[in-house]
Amino acid sequence: MAPSETSASARQPHRENVKRLPSLVTRIYARLDRLECLVRLIVRIAVGIEFFGSGLGKLGKLSGLVQYFRSLGIPAPEIQAPLVASTELVCGALIVVGLLTRPAALMLCGVMTVAIVTAAAPEKHITASWHGLLEFFYLPEVLLLLLLASLVVAGPGRASLDARLGARG
């Protein structure tokens, strides 16, 4: 066998593998697509439990929460504190079971936006700079806000009461 034939045949298996790559990627993506329902369920349960637990804890220490809200300059802290705690508790529970998921997540997006603007960002002294932007995205409140926003946009998934009841929420 001539040297040129050997090198051509040695490259052939590699070319065949390269030709198969798009098919392999397509199959991998198809399998990942089948996991979407499970991933949405896990995210929904994790986020819902986080807020349910947070609301429960806040309701148990309401006087301290009122004082904290007062120190942040939040108006009417005697009204806002129980409202926020109750919203977190109820909306967290709704998200866990996947009932009224989109409205519940949207309400919690509002709670998180206020929490970021009034407490999280100021306490971390986040500034309008590249470093400040990086610090901002390290805030757990921002991550929770993004997860909630994904629930508002994408919905709860098939493994939810919303899906069972035929709702789009």
Image (cartoon, rainbow, N blue to C red):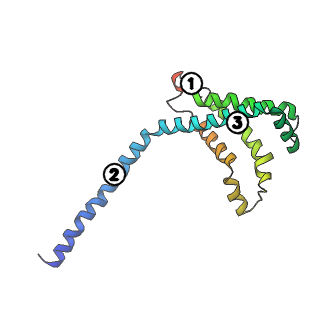
- Callouts 3 and 1 close, C-beta under 8 Å: no
Mark 3 or 2: the one toward you: 3
**Count of labels in the image:** 3
Q: Quadrant of the N terminus?
A: bottom left
Disc on res. 54 = 3
Residue at 86% across, 39% down: 67
Q: Which amino acid is tagged 3?
A: Ser
The amino acid beneath tag 1 is Ala
Residue 46 lies, in percent from the top left, at: 58, 38
In the figure, residue 100 lies in which quadrant?
top right
Q: Say what secondary structure mark 3 lies in.
A: helix
Q: Position of residue 104 (x, y in %)?
A: 66, 31
Residue for badge 2: 24
Q: Residue furthest top?
A: 165
User: Could you say whether the residue bearing mark 1 is in a helix, strand or loop?
Assistant: loop
Give percent across and percent down for residue 113: 74, 43
Question: Comparing marks 3 and 1, which lies closer to the viewer?
Answer: 3
In the displayed structure, would residue 37 be above or below residue 133? Answer: above
| Residue 154 located left or right of residue 122 | left
Q: Secondary structure at mark 2?
A: helix
In front of the other: 146 or 125: 125
Q: Which mark is residue 167?
A: 1
